[in-house]
Image (cartoon, rainbow, N blue to C red):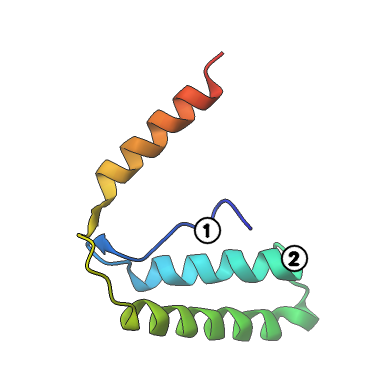
Amino acid sequence: MCRNIRTLYNYDPPATEAEVRAAAEQYVRKISGFTKPSRANAEAFDQAIDAVADASATLLGRLVTSAPAKNREVEAAKARARAAERFAA
């Protein structure tokens, strides 16, 4: 799957509507093969993004966990450390 789509669940603060929409757009781009659709396909593309964003927001709102919420800054620092180790030359 697309590496640009990030986990949005169980973060403090919760994912914003913009983050959910951005993930939906990445998903639709990935499965359609278009980074920018033609005028003929723009409406279908936008409707798909709206549908995926709505479904994603519903899912995120209904999920339940007993795990503590993750901190965005801490998780970003961990990802940078993994990347530095992985790509160190």
The residue that disc 1 covers is 5
Disc 1 versus disc 2: distance between alpha carbons?
A: 16 Å
- The location of residue 71, given as percent across then percent down, is 23, 51
User: Who's the residue at 54% across and 71% down the image?
Assistant: 24
**Is residue 36 visible in the rendered structure shown here?**
no
- Of residues 44 and 70, the one drawn nearer to the viewer in this rendering: 70
> In the displayed image of the protein, which residue is found farthest to the front?
66
Image quarter hosting the N terminus: bottom right
Question: As displayed, is residue 8 above or below residue 78?
Answer: below
Q: Amino acid at mark 2?
A: Phe
What is the crowding at mark 2: few (fewer than 14 residues within 10 Å), some, or many (at least 20)? few
Image side of residue 50 versus residue 70, left or right:
right
Seen in the image, is 26 located left or right of residue 38? left
| Residue drawn at the location 27% of the way across and 71% of the way down | 65
For label 2, the residue is: 34
Q: Is residue 37 found left or right of 79 in the rendered image? A: right
